[in-house]
Image (tube, rainbow, N blue to C red):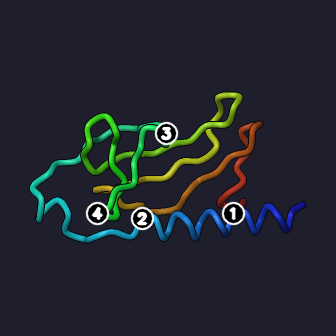
Amino acid sequence: MLASKAISVWLQMLIWASLFYGCEQYKEKNGIEPSHNEVNFLHMEFKEDGLWHNRDSGLPFTGIAVRYHKNGRKAWSTRLQDGKAIGRVKEWDEDGNTTWPGK
């Protein structure tokens, strides 16, 4: 079970890394100022420009994207800057215990 969880975590990391690869100068090229807040991952959209956008505003997102377990507790969160992931993804189990990164 522990091995399958580790594989799942690594697979998620590889997916995130591939999804967040985008152009470096998006804001400078497009003159768009991104939104700044925390948004549920379900309100995010990955677009052809290689960036994550807030579905409500349509702008590249800057802030924290979160996903929740069915019980309402955070499942994971990650920081985004101009639609690109920065830093580490943080994950929690249904009880609120940190699962990634480890202790």
- Which element carries disc 1, helix, strand or loop? helix
Residue located beneath label 3 in the image: 42
Q: Which residue lies furthest to the front in this view?
A: 48
Measured as percent of width and height from the top left, residue 86 is found at 41, 62
Please indicate whether residue 80 sits to the left or right of residue 25 in the image. right
- Which element carries disc 4, helix, strand or loop? loop
**Is label 3 in contact with label 1 (beta carbons under 8 Å)?**
no
Residue located beneath label 4 in the image: 49
Check the picture and name the quadrant holding the C terminus: bottom right
**Nearest to N terminus: mark 1 or mark 2:** 1
Q: Give the foreground label among 4 and 1.
A: 4
Q: Residues within 10 Å of mark 1 (few under 14, many from 20)?
A: some
**Nearest to N terminus: mark 3 or mark 1:** 1
Q: How far apart are marks 1 and 2 (CA)?
A: 16 Å
> Which numbered circle lies on residue 20?
2
Q: How far apart are marks 2 and 4 (CA)?
A: 10 Å
> Which numbered circle lies on residue 9?
1
